[in-house]
Image: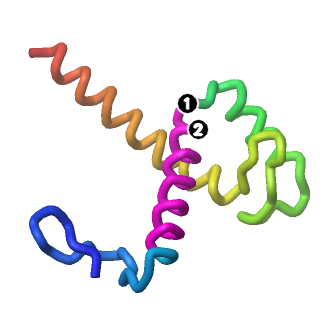
Amino acid sequence: MRLNASGGKVWGAPEVKSMETEALWNATKEKYQAQFNFIKDMRIRQKRNIFLILRQCEEVTPDTFLPLYGLHCGEFACFQILAEHSRKESKTEAASCTAR
């Protein structure tokens, strides 16, 4: 069982049965963190290019691969939403700090 620092169970984490499972869990976590950081740091021009590609394709699914960026459309959509949300939160916090 995965436990957090206070000894409670980590919800959503799989039961660790072996070192192999633990390694796969960590590799998957690192992959998604890297993808999130990649999309968060993309330039507006790159994001607009992806949206242009998606509009021009006739049959786009979440599994459509974007080889230039090394992402699937579903991954891009998910992490773009998360990155945009975190960017808006940080701007709101910065604005409230400067208003003081």
Question: For mark 2, what is the residue?
Answer: 38
At 47% from the left edge and 41% from the top edge, which residue is drawn?
A: 83
Question: For mark 1, what is the residue?
Answer: 41
Name the residue nearer the viewer: 76 or 69: 69
The image quadrant of residue 5 is bottom left
Give the amino acid type for the residue marked by disc 2 in the picture. Answer: Phe
At 46% from the left edge and 48% from the top edge, which residue is drawn?
A: 82
Name the residue nearer the viewer: 17 or 61: 17
Q: Secondary structure at mark 1?
A: loop
Is residue 70 shown left or right of residue 80?
Answer: right
State which region is magenta. Answer: 22-41
Is residue 74 shown left or right of residue 3?
Answer: right
Q: Are marks 2 and 1 in contact (CB under 8 Å)?
A: yes
In percent of width and height, residue 85 lies at: 41, 43
The question of residue 16 being in magenta is answered with no
The image quadrant of residue 19 is bottom left
- Mark 2 to mark 1: distance in Å? 5 Å
